[in-house]
Image (cartoon, rainbow, N blue to C red):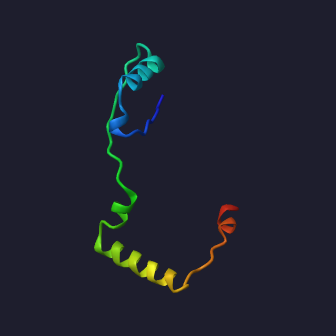
Amino acid sequence: MYTSFQVKASELDETFIEGIKAIYKSKNITIIIEEDEDTTEYLLSTEANRKHLSKAIKNAKKGNTTKVDIDKYLKK
């Protein structure tokens, strides 16, 4: 069984731990802590991404946009 909980560290309390205990009772479990990366930080993490996003924002502000029919791609 694989279960993922996404919470802020500041929200971890005894209630959370008791909830885990109630779900898994006496089973052996593994707890892995993974820090979530902020999407904005990731997108701005390289010079190439920053330039691409800056250009895209400028184009959007000028009205230079492209309409995409998402349904066309979902019907495959």
User: Could you tell me residue 24's position as x and y percent?
Assistant: 45, 19
User: Could you tell me residue 30's position as x and y percent?
Assistant: 35, 27
Quarter residue 29 falls in: top left
**Above/below status of 7 relative to 18:** below
Q: Could you tell me which residue is drawn at 41 percent across and 23 percent down?
A: 15
- The reply, left or right, for residue 12 in relation to residue 65 is left
User: Could you tell me residue 46's position as x and y percent?
Assistant: 29, 69
Q: Could you tell me which residue is drawn at 70 percent across and 62 percent down?
A: 75
Q: Could you tell me which residue is drawn at 51 percent across and 80 percent down?
A: 60
- The reply, left or right, for residue 3 in relation to residue 73 is left
**Above/below status of 55 relative to 28:** below
User: Could you tell me residue 16's position as x and y percent?
Assistant: 41, 26
**Above/below status of 54 relative to 10:** below
- How many numbered marks are there? 0
Quarter residue 43 falls in: bottom left
Quadrant where the image shows the C terminus: bottom right
Q: Could you tell me which residue is drawn at 47 percent across and 32 percent down?
A: 3
